[in-house]
Image (spheres, rainbow, N blue to C red):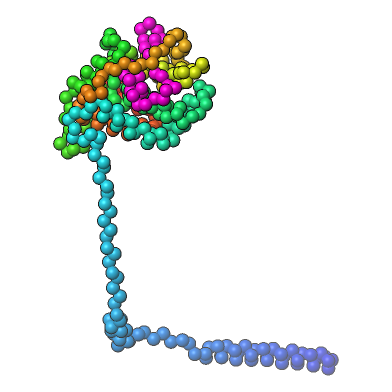
Amino acid sequence: MASPWLTHALRLSALALLAGCSCEHRGHEEASSAPQPTVVAPSQASMLAARAELERAPVQTIEPVPLVEVEIPEPPPPPFAGREQVSVEELLEAMKAELPALAESEALRADYEAFRAAFELEHSEALYLDFVRVSLAFEATRDGGWWGLQWKITNEQPNSEKIWAQWRALELAWPEDGGAPELPPTTAIAECDELSALFAFFARRLGLSRDSHVGLFWPTGNHVVAVWIVDARSEDPTRVVIPTTQIFLEADATLGDRGFNPWKQRTIYDYRRQDIPADATLPGPLASYFIAQVRQHGDASQAEQLERMNERMNLQMEG
């Protein structure tokens, strides 16, 4: 027979179980009897009313943005546009007019600094401007240069008279559209001494300072290049080779090349010969082309000049 204490404990446990079941049952009933949300589809009338409201709303109009017409400036006319003849003096003055712009070239300034360091020269603005003048004359008149000169043996005298004669004999016409004239890859044939004389002619007349001389140098008995003498009037002048052709030199020979020793020749005379009168004339399209080439290529570095020179020489050989 169970003790009264045990019987009392069992009764309490049974009552607790009954109370828990009753609570869970009531909670379930309450949860199931809670109202559920009702989804009501909009009626056709309400949809029509909303549509009518939208139609009555004011419509915002966006003003069109006016088109801005950008005027593209027309390219400047070519130098000496339409001129049938241009004098040598006019050509030289036009070249001088390009010098200030060339002097602003970062590439030319960098080449000058390298040149000055290589020859251990003190900087002066006069020296830099002479470097610009010499560079212009050199790149324009060298074999394969801007102006279409091509080296071949001619057995002519060491002056530029025959080059000028070939230029003056060219029959050129302006394009009908008034644009820049096109020229053949080769404008004149000349030997090394003629090219060197032509370089000296232009370099001198571009306004070299009194301390700079340019002349002809025979490194061998059958070859001529030009030389620029810096500080020509001092006791310690500097001679700079101007390789107007690549004959007997490396393919990358340029202003200041060391392939020849310019001191091998005891005296280098300043070239002052008047190869052509200042009032002599050239075909207008040719003079225009010359100045256009200066503008197009004048501010390039020596490395770029060499690359373009080789391209022009290839075109000349193909032609």
Q: In which quarter of the image is residue 144?
A: top left
Residue 148 on the magenta span: no
User: Is residue 289 positioned above or below 143 on the image?
Assistant: below
Residue occupying image coordinates x 29% and y 25%: 147
| Residue 234 visible (yes or no) | yes
Q: Farthest residue toward the left?
A: 176
Q: What stretch is highlighted in magenta?
A: 196-225
Is 97 or 150 nearer to us in this picture?
Answer: 97
Give coordinates of residue 208: x percent, y percent.
Answer: 39, 25
Q: How many marks?
A: 0
Is 297 or 67 nearer to us in this picture?
Answer: 297
Residue occupying image coordinates x 24% and y 36%: 78
Q: In the visual, does 95 lie left or right of 265?
A: left
Give coordinates of residue 195: x percent, y percent.
Answer: 32, 17
Give coordinates of residue 202: x percent, y percent.
Answer: 33, 23
Residue occupying image coordinates x 52% and y 90%: 34
Is 138 or 60 nearer to us in this picture?
Answer: 138
Give coordinates of residue 242: x percent, y percent.
Answer: 40, 19
User: Is residue 236 positioned above or below 37 on the image?
Assistant: above
Is 152 or 24 nearer to us in this picture?
Answer: 152
Q: In the visual, does 100 lie left or right of 154?
A: right
